Image: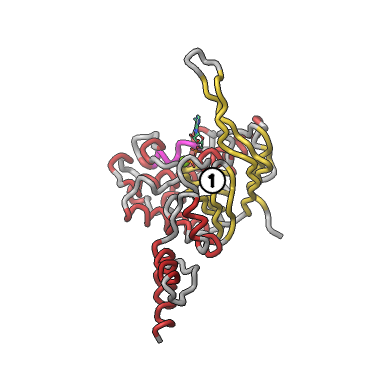
Amino acid sequence: MKLKIIKTENLDFDYEIYDDKGQVTEMNPALRGVNLTVQKGEFLAILGHNGSGKSTLAKHFNGILTPTRGKVFVNGIDVSDEEKIYEIRQTVGMVFQNPDNQIVAAIVEEDVAFALENLGVPPEEIRERIDEAMKLVDIYKYHKHAPHRLSGGQKQRVAIAGVIAMHPKCIVLDEPTAMLDPKGRKEVMKTIKMLNGKGVTVVLITHYMEEAAQAERVVVMDKGAVIMDGTPKEIFSKVERLKEVGLDVPQVTELAYELKKEGVEIPADVLNEEECVKSLINIFK
Ligand code: ADP
Ligand code: MG
């Protein structure tokens, strides 16, 4: 049986807009009727152009925001239950876009230990957990370094280590590679896939189609709603639909799409260079 780690039921969220006197003048609807289930152990990618509601949705996954209407459950716990907020935060960890905003300490290992210290975990256990987390994401060699001296990719891995040290069942990453160079992006993707391989549920919000193509399942958002949900092959074969909502497809998929339009008999769902090359070789054999 598949187990759910996150479930949203008819989730609506409105941001309240205030005037300078602190009165609510307007409501900005950011999520509309979202019904989404994340299974334990899966690697889910969420796509959508700017303003489609991805970050707002992610913030419901560990109770940073709570629904205006509808429900969100994390491991069966209602995120609106304020008494359960610590349990929710330990079940689902979040990593954000800007690594600099997530660093709180002057030394890498202190930064990784920060949340555990706040939880009152005994010092010996903190030591064990942070060493394990830093080794896992391959930043142990920098454990005495100053985080601000590290590269973007290394800093993001420090942030991931801090989350992993909490032993979460699920990690939600909101565009974690958006501010990184290609090398940093690769490092972070490798780390994410390694963690998923170890059984951690991963929700990755990204605007890189090549990253989403590596997930098991892809959800597409538009105007606060989930409009597509399927495997990367199912999603990226709908090139026209993706373009309508302001998204691209991975470059190789685009190439295959253009070739197909010109009459070349290539599958519409090639996702990586290897598949593309194989298909082309088959054609010209
Ligand atoms: P995405 O992450 O997909 O870019 P967001 O979840 O950030 O989308 O935003 C969804 C909608 O909510 C957008 O219309 C955005 O302008 C609005 N929004 C986001 N944050 C706030 C906020 N703090 N106050 C008011 N509106 C917001
Ligand atoms: Mg966002």
Front residue of this view, candidates 162 and 185: 185
Q: Name the residue under label 1.
A: 222
Residue 212 is covered by the magenta coloring: no
Q: In this view, does 198 lie to the left or right of 251?
A: right
Determine the residue located farthest toward the left in the rendered image: 149
Is the magenta region chiefly helix, strand or loop?
Answer: helix
**Residue 245 position within the rendered picture, expressed as x and y whole percent measured from the top left:** 49, 49
Amino acid carrying mark 1 in the image = Asp
Q: In the image, what residue occupies the spot 53% across and 58% down? A: 198
The C terminus lies in quadrant: bottom left
How packed mark 1 is, by other alpha carbons closer than 10 Å (few <14, some 14-19, many 20 or more), is many
Say which of 221 and 125 sits in front.
221
Q: Which residue is drawn at 65% across and 30% down?
A: 82
**Observer-nearest of 281 and 153:** 281
x and y, in percent, of residue 213 in the image:
47, 60
Which residue is rendered at x = 47% and y = 15% of the image? Answer: 20
Callout 1: SS: strand
Q: Residue at left 53%, top 38%?
A: 56
The outermost residue toward the front is 262
The residue stretch that appears in magenta: 109-116
In the figure, is residue 183 to the left or right of 73? left
Judge whether residue 127 can be spotted in this image. Answer: no
